[in-house]
Amino acid sequence: MSAMSDSDSAAEPVAASPLEFEKHLAELEQIVAAMERGDMSLEESLQAYERGVALTRQCQAALDSAQQRIEVLATKGAPAADSEPQAGE
């Protein structure tokens, strides 16, 4: 696992595709399990933590993107208040 630079951590996370999301989530679960075992050196733990933060941000960006898509679809499916037929039309 490589350490992230300050410029990497300041960048906006890019939303992952559904397949990438699943891979990121699985990697994050592996990192958590490894850290919970406690058999990592301090440096390895710091690198794993940095990677976990990056993965968390990417997964959150993917979830935010999915939520926006759902909201757009829900809005398109709901009839607009001014689109209802007026009396006498």
Image: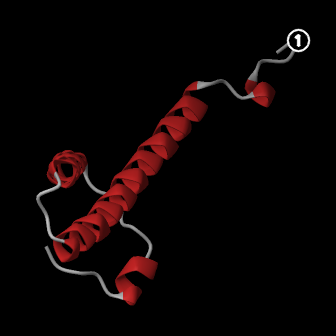
Q: Is residue 3 left or right of residue 54?
A: left
Residue 48 lies, in percent from the top left, at 22, 66
Q: Quadrant of the C terminus?
A: top right
Extreme-right residue of the structure: 87
Quarter of the view holding residue 51: bottom left
Q: Residue at x 34, y 52 (%)?
A: 59
Residue located beneath label 1 in the image: 87
- Residue 74 vs 31, above or below: the answer is above
Mark 1 surroundings: few (<14), some (14-19) or many (≥20) residues within 10 A: few
Q: Residue at x 20, y 45 (%)?
A: 22
Q: Residue at x 32, y 66 (%)?
A: 54
Residue 57 lies, in percent from the top left, at 39, 60
At mark 1, the secondary structure is: loop
Q: Residue at x 42, y 56 (%)?
A: 61
Residue 16 lies, in percent from the top left, at 29, 56
Residue 19 lies, in percent from the top left, at 17, 47
Looking at the picture, which amino acid does disc 1 mark?
A: Ala
